[in-house]
Every structure is written in structure tokens, then in C-alpha cells.
Amino acid sequence: MNNQFIATEKANILIVDDTLENLRLLSNMLTQEGYKVRGVPKGQKAIATAQLAPPDLILLDIMMPEMDGYEVCQQLKAGEKTRDIPVIFLSALNDTLDKIQAFAVGGVDYITKPFHVEEVLARVESQLRLRSLQKQLLQQNTILQKEIRERQVLEKRLRDSEAEMRGFFEAMSDIVLFINGEDNSLKIAPTNPDRFYPPDTDILGQTIELFSGEKADIFNDKVKQALEIQQPINFEYSLELENRQIWFIASIAPTSENTVVWVARDISDRYLAEAAQKRRAIIDNLLLNISRAFLDQDIDTAIDFTLSKIGEYTGSDRSYIIRFYDQQKYLTMTHEWCAKTAEPQIELLQEIPVETFPWMYAQLLSGKTVIISDVDNLPAEAVAEKTALTRLSTRSLINIPLLHRNQLVGCIGLVTVHAAKQWNPEEINLLKLVGEIVAIGLARNDAEIDRQQAAQAAVAASKAKSEFLANMSHELRTPLTAILGLSEVLREETFGPLTAKQHQKLATIEQSGQHLLELINDVLDLSKIEAGKMELQLAPTDISGLCNASLAFVRQQAHQKRIQLSCQVPPRLGKIEIDERRMRQVLINLLSNSVKFTPEGGEVWIEIQADREREIVQFSVVDNGIGIAPQDINKLFRPFVQLDGAFNRRYAGTGLGLALVRQVVELHGGSVSLESELGKGSRFTASVPWRQKSEAIAHPESCISYPHCLHLNQVLIVEDSAPAAEQVAHYLLELGVKNYTIHSLGTGTTQAALQLNPDVIILDLQLPDRSGWDVLAQLRSEQRTQHIPILIVSVADKPARTEDLGVCEYLVKPFSRHQFQLALRKLIALGDATDNPKSASEKTPLILLAEDSETTIYTIVEYLEVKGYRMATALNGIQAVQMTKQLKPDLVLMDIQMPEMDGLEATRQIRADGEIAATPIIALTSLALPGDREKCLEAGANEYITKPVSLKKLTEAIAQFLLGS
């Protein structure tokens, strides 16, 4: 019975696999070979089965539910009964790291699915043979000791039958020697004599030195020791036989006082297997550490670590990385490791033409490994390499190509310089695996460098864009301030009356300036949104007021084309939380487009739909204009794109409006849709989330959100429209005015005024029973009511005759909350000044203008002085701070971009001075980029107005601050 049969005849094998088909296949296959097979589908059950009845070998699948094969193996190796059972992993995973992990947790072998029957049987038999050998080795001592004891008893009888015994020993595969302990000579010729010496050699009487002179002393000591203690001694040793190293395990046992029997068994196969397993574990650990280095370290540190480890492991004198550059025209050694006995060569191999190594480069380019055991034996076509390598003191070399996406990017190599080296398969495979790791690391590093360069380029481009927009904003807004300001001053006839033709020319100037300003604002707004720096100012907003204010903006344009405007808002919609300014911008853009593309005599209207279930509010702008072709709809919302983009296009515009519409609506968390039919009209719908805060409507009388409440005892509202009267009443309540009376007819207005004695009268001109002008004239003719300030509201534009009707202000419907507040405050201020003109004269506000542009100074100073303000000017920030301390003005208009000291720093210094820290400051700037407003307010400005400045709006802002204070 041979060893293989003994090892496998009755072996118990446990198969662990969650796939029943695999269990069945493996069980049948192994059962047919005579193995006793048990199969379990789960890891936990496998552990329990193995502990209850330990098998001789376990076939273990990796990918299993509940507990994978790695964990099962770890628990088996932790158990006392199961730790020595060999485990062969079965898996479809073929990655190197998976195999590394399998051997790391204690596996002895790794079979990749799909497997071949012959491979599985061969590996199972190999592992069982190794396990059998291990068991036999453990048992051999017992067997040998038993045999020795028996031989001691039978020594005399055995001596008489020496010839018979010799024949028996010669039939054994083990080596048996009988040695005389007195002189260490051989008493009986050993078994298998041809393993030790030539045939026909007389060895009887020869000493142990005959077999191994080098280890004779060790052998003699072992024999002496066994005789002294009269106990067997076991040890392992190796001999160089037949030009190879043979390993033995020996047992030396005394057979008498002076004789020992030496029994040795060849364990080279087991020893080589164990050595190979140790080397494999070392390599696996080396690859694992290299992989971790590329994950945890920078690329240079990881490569230096890798080169040192593979150089030391293979006993090379130098290891290196070479990269190819400039479309693979040049090679450069980027990294190098050298043993202490080798000189660095990295400086010599920089930007070397690839033609220096033509044969080697061709090999690498084709993906082949270059293996040179001895430079002297290079082929004839490698004459250039032989010359270059000899000059570099290279004796042997191996180069592995580094490939990324099948493109050659470099190579990794090993070199010896002192002696030729035969590169073995293990070293070649190791270098190939390391090369794959290095190639991935280099590719990832190159990608990261490209990403960083792209990011830097993007930052530079963004910075250049911001600088361009800032310069454009400043350069365009500064002259527009003078253009629009002076046109506004002239149109108001501040310096004298104008002819109709002059009014027409000024209107053209102002319209052109406003058109350019809108273009600048559109570009800056779009840039702000794209940069992610536009923040919405959400607040409860009255939808009806928002729609009417938006319609008012396009009313003149629609009137010129005889286009009817209307609005459909559901009743009792209440307020929703949106950014009123931005949504007004959305509606105005949509309305402007509809009016622009609707023929004369058409219709444009706003339609509001509230969907409480979906919690959205839809703002639709509908027209019966020219419509849009289906193929053009997707182009509409792109910046700077117009459907009619030719130089001779019929319709004007920048192509930014709808892009802004989409961006603003999406900032609200909504969406924009379009329904259109060519020749019949379009419906643009902006859907936004319905945010409705209860606190915005639960306490309408609260004025917490409005810092400057008005102290009015009574207000008379003369208005026949209930919704309009409710809107005015709501605005009054927000200003803290709780006492108001609504009068719906013109008749009886004077009597009501006499009875109530109101502080203010709000008068609608279109009353059902009589003209509002008549009511106004009657109020002014009555001595007891002629002093009462009157706020006129009407859908008609403001006529000139209101100037002759006492203290009045005029608002065109629809008006916003802000417009109503400003008009009412201005009306009250005018009333106070009229009641006490001397006091008003003494308290004429002083305004300090800090500005370095002479044109802007001239425009603003002339206008504000006509409006009754005293003016002082500073040409830079230093003067602004000094003059604020000296003059203590009522308000400062602060330009931001000034020489010597900018407006931001001047504002900070004013705020830091206790005497003048409370002075109101309005920042004036041509900058309108994301963050500019925040910078001004953080510096201490109370308000921020961009150039070109509307003088009317500037005056209103000044009045608001001065009246509020």
C-alpha cells in the first residue's frame, strides 16, 4: 500500500457552498474517488459540523450569505479541534487581493470557479498527502520508538539473522543505518546505498564522515547524545545530493550501550511545499503593503517604498521606474533605489531618446517583458543595448512594461551590476504584479494632476470672469449715472420748461439708457445665479399686488401696440412666501416678451392657479401672439440665444430674459414650462412651491416687520373698489395705522372729512357718482379741509394739474407696498413742512456726497439742491471721514471706488467714531457682482444703491432715512 493510497483512501472531506449545484457536483466527483463527503450550505453550520466531527480537509466557498468564507476560515483556525484542518478556498473571485486575503486567513490553496475536475482532485490529493505526511511524522516517533524497544528485546536474534534483516531494510523506502557509537563506524550497510555513495563501494567500518564531512560533528554529537540518555532523538537535516538539496527527518535510537539505529525519511516534498507556502505568504504580504502604500501615501513615497522592497526581496542591486514623454520620444528615470554596493544612475537617464534602446523599446511597446540574464549574451539585434548597458555597469536586467488603457507609459525594472543573474519565474511574476499596481497608481496620480490643473484653470477663468464683470459694471454704470440722472432732471423741468420735441428726445435718451442698464443687470444677475451666489429674500407677498405691479411695467409698451392687458387671480389666495423682487423680474420678462411678440390689437394676460393638493402656485403669462415652433422651444431658455438671431432681426432683445426666468424659478424650487402653437400664441408657466406662513397673515395689525410705524390718528379712504380699499387698509395696518374709514362714493366725502378730521385722505379719481377731481377741488375749497394731505390713486398716469392742488402725492395703480409707504411718508413730510415752514427751513438736511467722478458730482448735487437739500462734497475716503467729523451731516452718500481710501474703509472708520457712528450712509457703487451688497452692509452702510443711480429713487431713499430718523 503506497503513501498516496494511505493518505486518501478513507479521507473525510467537508464541502461548504451555498450553491446546491456546486455541492452536488463536488460531492459526486469526490465520492467517486473514494472520499467520504459531507456537504453543508452555510458557514455557521459548517463550523459546528467540523467541531463535532473534524474532517481531513474542507472545501470552502467565499461568497455566501450570513457569513462569508473568510470569516468561516478565521473561526475554524481559532478552534482547537479545527485549527489544523487544511482549507481550500473555492471562488469565482480571481483578483489578486482576494487570493491574498484567502491565504492571510489561513487557506492552504485557492481554486477559481469554474473549476476543472482534474485540478480539484489534484489539489485535494496534494493537500491530503501533505496532511497525511504530517500525521505520519507525528506518529513516526512512536512507531520508531516501539520498533527500537522491540529490537532491543530481539537484538540477539536479529544479530544472528543480519542477512535477513538487511534484506528487509533494503526493501524500505526510509534510510536505516546501524552505527557503532565507540568510533561512529557503520556496523551494517545502510538501506538505499545508492542515495549516498557509488555502487560497489565498501563502506562497512567507514565513519559518518563518508556521507557528509561538513555535518559529521553534528551527526556524531547526536549519536553520542542518544547513547548517553538511552532515548531516541529526532531532528531534521539536509544534504546536497545529486546536485540538489535533500531534506530528511531522522530518529536516532540506541539498540545497545554502544550501537544506535539511524532511521531517516526524505521529507523534501513537504519541506519544499512549506517553503513555497512561506515564500507565497511573504510575497502576498509584500504586495499587500505595496498596495496600501499607494492608497495611504503620496505617489513618490509609495514608489520609493515599492522599489526598495522588491529590490531587497529579489537581491537586486538597483530597481527603478522609467517614464516615456513627449509622445514616447524620450525616456526619463523618475525613481530609483540602489543597494549599498551600487551607484545611482538616475542623473544619467534623463530625457534620453528612445533610439538609445531600440530593441528594448520595441519589446516594451509590444507589451513584452525584457529579460536579460547576462548582457554578454544579448542577441545581435540588441547591439545598441549592449553598448549602453555595459556603459551603465549592468550585468543582468528585467523590465516590465507599465500599461494604462493598453498604452505604454513606462516600465519598472531590476538590475544586477556585480554578477549575472538567472531571473526565476517567481521574481518575474512578482514584478509583473507590482508593475500593475504601479501603473494604476501612476494613472491615478496623472489624473489627479490633470484635475488639479483643470481646477486651477477653472478658478483662474472664474476670477477673470469676475474681474471682467466688475470692470464692465463699473465702466458702464458710471457714465449711465450721468446720462440717466441728467435726463431725469431735465424731464422734470428742474431747470426750466421744455418743448414737446425736447421731451421726446429726452425720453429716447432715457429709454436707451434704461435698455442698456437692463442688459447689464441681466448679465450680472445671470452670472450671480450661475456662480451660486444669488440668495433669495423670501417674504410673504401679495400675489394680486405683484401681478398688478408687473403689468404696470409693460402698460406703456402695450398701449403703443393697442394690446389689452388683464390679470386673473383667485379670490382669497392670501400671501405666499417668495422673493417678490425676483418674481416680479420673472413676470416682467415674460410679459415683455409676450407684448413684444404679440401683434397690434392682441391680448396678454396673467393667470394665477393655486393647487393646494400639490402645494404649488402657477404664474402663467398667456398671449395670442406669433407662437413658437416645436423645434425652437428647447432653445428658448439658453443664455444669449434668440430664435431670430440675424442682424436684421425684427424683434430686439439680448436673449437673456428667459434664461433668467428659468434660473430664478428654479432657485425657488420650481420649474418653467411652455405651451405654444405657431401662429396662435403661447403660455409660459412658472410653478413655484406654495409656502404660506401663518404668522404672515394671523396678525395683520402687527408692524414688527416695518421699523418706522406712522403715528396717524385717522385716515379717510375714498375708494369704490372693495379689493383696492382692502389693499390700502392692509398696508396701513402694516404701518401701525389702526384707525381708518372707507368711503365708497364721491358724494359726502367733504362731510366725512369734516366729521373725522383725518390726518390723510387717500382718494381714488374714478368714483362711480362723480369725478375724483371734483371731490379734490371741493376739499381744497373748504377752509377746514384744505390743509389735509391727500394721496391720489388712479389707473391713469399722473397729470400736471396735481401740482396746483395743495399737498398731494400721486400713485398709479397697481402700486406696491413699498411705493405706497414712500408716497405716504413723503406726503406727511410735505404736510409738516407746509404747516411750519420756518421750522422746515431751519432743519434743511445737510448731505455729504463722497464721490471722485465730476460728472456724477454735478448730476447728484444739482438735483438734490433743487430738491431743497444742502450739499457738501468729498473727493476721496479720507476727506469723507474728516468732513463727516467736521460737518456732522444728516446723511452720507458714499461712493465705494475712490482714490487714497475706498468707500468701504471710510464707512468702517465713520462707524468706529462714537460721535458720528450713527450717521446714515447710503453706498453708491458701479459694482453689482455677487457679494458686493454684503460687503457694503458689513462695512456699515445702511443701504446699497448701484449705479447708474435713479435720482428719483435716490431721493426717495434719502427721504426714507431722514424721515425715519
Image: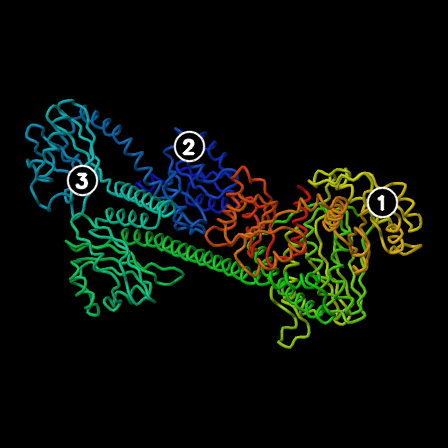
Distance from the alpha carbon under mark 1 to that under mark 2: 103 Å
Asked if marks 1 and 2 touch (Cβ < 8 Å), the reply is: no
Q: Nearer the viewer, residue 890 or 334?
A: 890
**Position of 31 relative to 486 (above/below):** above
Please name the residue that numbered disc 3 is placed on: 238
Q: Nearer the viewer, mark 1 or mark 3?
A: 1
Asked if marks 3 and 2 touch (Cβ < 8 Å), the reply is: no
Classify residue 921 as left or right of residue 44. right
Please name the residue that numbered disc 1 is placed on: 716
Q: Nearer the viewer, mark 1 or mark 2?
A: 1
Q: Nearer the viewer, residue 486 or 869?
A: 869
Please name the residue that numbered disc 2 is placed on: 54
Q: Indicate the secondary structure of the residue bearing disc 2.
A: loop
**Position of 190 relative to 353 (above/below):** above
Residue 359 location (% of width, % of height): 25, 67
Question: Mark 1 or mark 2: which comes first in sequence?
Answer: 2
Placement of the N terminus among the 4 image quadrants:
top left
Distance from the alpha carbon under mark 3 to that under mark 2: 34 Å
Q: Nearer the viewer, residue 196 or 302?
A: 302
Residue sitting at x 75%, y 37%: 702
Classify residue 782 as left or right of residue 111. right
Amino acid at dot 1: Leu
Q: Indicate the secondary structure of the residue bearing disc 1.
A: strand
Residue sitting at x 60%, y 49%: 847
Amino acid at dot 3: Ser
Question: Mark 1 or mark 3: which comes first in sequence?
Answer: 3
Q: Indicate the secondary structure of the residue bearing disc 3.
A: strand
Question: Mark 3 or mark 2: which comes first in sequence?
Answer: 2
Amino acid at dot 2: Pro
Residue sitting at x 50%, y 52%: 876
Specify the farthest residue to the front.
838
